[in-house]
Image: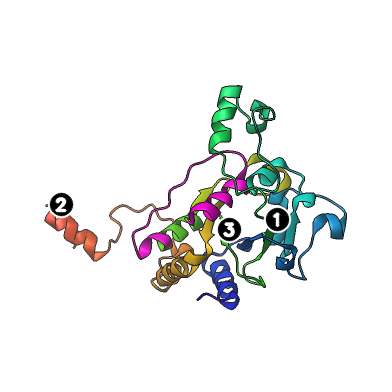
């Protein structure tokens, strides 16, 4: 069984092996107030302001803050709907403007597939740096560049040949990075949305990998294996070189196909 200390170690190793700019985030959906750790900041109660969920994630990964976002703390609609903190839209309240589409038909289509947790099941969401979280997360969010993501996907694929499938919506990254993973327990890739870029400092080169908590050990095993083989992110270098040195299995394949093999 993976312990809190194990997850903390994973956070440290992810930052070291991938040379991440910000900390991976431990995320937990809260069912009751007793689940909120003492060190958690509650923005409205403790600081007198509201945040969008992407801003809470930014404070966690950039400043190391543990933040509990309940209904009253939110300043953006998407997470309130997606996390089941308020009732979903119905025929009277839905509009094209909400989903940034041209007409009502398109809005209805998006609303139908918009991922949502059960209304009333959770009171909020908790985030903390993975390396220092005092709780076992439901999932982990890793903000990386695409080259770092490539190394993570190599690690995911290593043991069982698993390929990550995702659908991409250009908005509502706070929902798409969390809710589908809670519902189906699978990895997911999400693009930071315009609000996360404008209000939460997500970089143009950043992308999000969501990892279910019960898959962290498997992914970390693959990541450490590639790091030992000097095939992780920090070991890849650019070199546009003709007739570059190749692994032996390349040579065997080319010999089998009757193609040139270097001496």
Q: Earlier in the sequence, mark 2 or mark 1?
A: 1
Give the image location of residue 44, x and y in percent. 84, 54
Q: Residue at x 52, y 68 (%)?
A: 17
Q: Which residue is label 3 attached to?
A: 141
| Crowd tier of the residue under label 2, counting other residues whose Cα lies within 10 Å: few below 14, some 14–19, many 20 or above | few
In reply to whether residue 183 is colored magenta, the answer given is yes
How far apart marks 2 and 1 lie (CA) works out to 60 Å
Question: Dot 1 lies on which element?
Answer: strand
Rendering quarter of residue 131:
bottom right
* Residue toward you, 28 or 53: 28
Question: Which segment is the magenta one?
Answer: 156-185
Label number found at residue 124: 1
Q: Which residue is label 2 attached to?
A: 259
Q: Is residue 83 left or right of residue 222?
A: right
Q: Residue furthest front?
A: 120
* Residue 69 visible at all: yes
Question: Dot 3 lies on which element?
Answer: strand
* Figure colour scheme: rainbow
Q: Earlier in the sequence, mark 1 or mark 3?
A: 1
Q: In the rendered structure, are the residues bearing label 2 and label 3 in contact, judged by CB atoms less than 8 Å apart?
A: no
């Amino acid at each position: 069984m993976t312990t809190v200390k194990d997850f903390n170690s994973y956070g440290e190793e992810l930052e070291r092996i991938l040379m991440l700019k910000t900390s991976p985030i431990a995320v937990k959906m809260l069912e009751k107030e007793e689940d909120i750790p003492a060190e958690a900041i509650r923005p409205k109660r403790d600081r007198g302001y509201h945040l969008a969920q992407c801003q809470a994630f930014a404070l966690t990964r950039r400043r190391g803050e543990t933040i509990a976002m309940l209904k009253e703390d939110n300043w953006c609609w998407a997470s309130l709907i997606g996390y089941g903190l308020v009732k979903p839209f119905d025929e009277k309240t839905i509009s094209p403007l909400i989903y940034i589409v041209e007409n009502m038909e398109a809005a209805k289509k998006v609303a139908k597939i918009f991922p949502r947790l059960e209304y009333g099941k959770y009171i909020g969401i908790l985030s903390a740096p993975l390396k220092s979280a005092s709780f076992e997360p439901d999932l982990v969010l890793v903000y990386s560049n695409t080259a770092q993501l490539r190394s993570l996907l190599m690690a995911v694929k290593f043991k069982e040949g698993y390929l990550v499938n995702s659908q991409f919506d250009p908005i509502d990254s706070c929902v798409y990075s969390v809710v589908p993973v809670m519902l189906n327990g699978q990895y997911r890739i999400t693009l930071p949305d315009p609000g996360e870029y404008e209000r939460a400092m997500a970089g143009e080169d950043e992308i999000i990998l969501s990892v279910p908590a019960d898959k962290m050990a498997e992914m970390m095993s693959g990541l450490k294996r590639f790091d030992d083989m000097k095939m992780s992110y920090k070991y890849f270098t650019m070199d546009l070189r003709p007739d570059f040195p190749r692994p032996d299995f390349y040579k065997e394949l080319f010999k089998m196909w009757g193609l040139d093999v270097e001496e």
